Image (cartoon, rainbow, N blue to C red):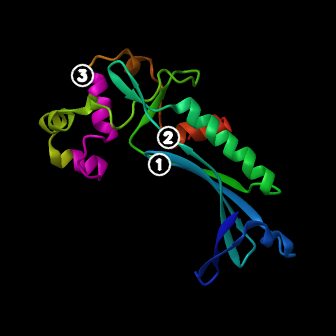
Amino acid sequence: MLAAIIDATGNVGHRGARSMADGVKAVRSYLALDLGAESGRAVLGQFDGEQLVCTEVRRFANQPVQLPGSLHWDILRIYAEHSFGIQEAQQQAESLASVGVDAWGVDFGLLDARGDLLANPVHYRDRRTAGMLELAEGLVGRQRIFESTGIQFLPINTLYQLLALREAKSPLLEAAKTLLTIPDLLAYWLSGRRV
């Protein structure tokens, strides 16, 4: 297995992942759980004070699931894959100093008062937000939206997903007590702590 190596000066090279363990320096290990639109991976970063060695320990396909009427994240399988990634990293590292989760920030899960997921998160590629950007602009104006969010105007944004739920009179909004973005939802399940 090859690992990317970044030294303290920023130079990048490659060498066998296990060769770093031969040194006498203390190594701190960190795990990044990265979820992209079509794949996910777990990357173990090991830093000895001078060099950072990054090793991909797990990769998996991330395919949305089409249900009648909506497109969803396969969030339970993604959680399982992240759990497997942690287990595989723990086999290569003495201990993990931290684990970070990175994913699309526009999609979310809604939790009830007990912290249970109310419904499988809808994927940003779902068509439910069609026309919601224009509706929001008509309700509060483009300037106010930008002042409140500071982000570009894309129909996939969380604001328009929430507006779509409101327009559909979804009972999820009434039952929801917490909204967690996809990375925060996964981190909550992995750690037991909501952020």
* Number of numbered tags placed on the structure image: 3
- Amino acid residing under circle 2: Asn
- Amino acid residing under circle 3: Glu
Mark closest to the chain's N terminus, 3 or 1: 1
Magenta includes 149? yes
Residue 27 position, x and y percent, is: 79, 68
Q: CA distance from mark 1 to mark 2?
A: 7 Å
Determine contact: label 1, label 2, CB under 8 Å.
yes
Q: Which residue is mark 1?
A: 36
Mark closest to the chain's N terminus, 2 or 3: 2
Is residue 39 among what the camera can see? yes
Q: Main secondary structure of the magenta part?
A: helix
Q: Which residue is mark 3?
A: 167
Q: Which residue is mark 2?
A: 62
Magenta residue span:
145-166
Q: Residue at x 25, y 40 (%)?
A: 155
Label 3, residues with CA under 10 Å away: few <14, some 14-19, many ≥20: few
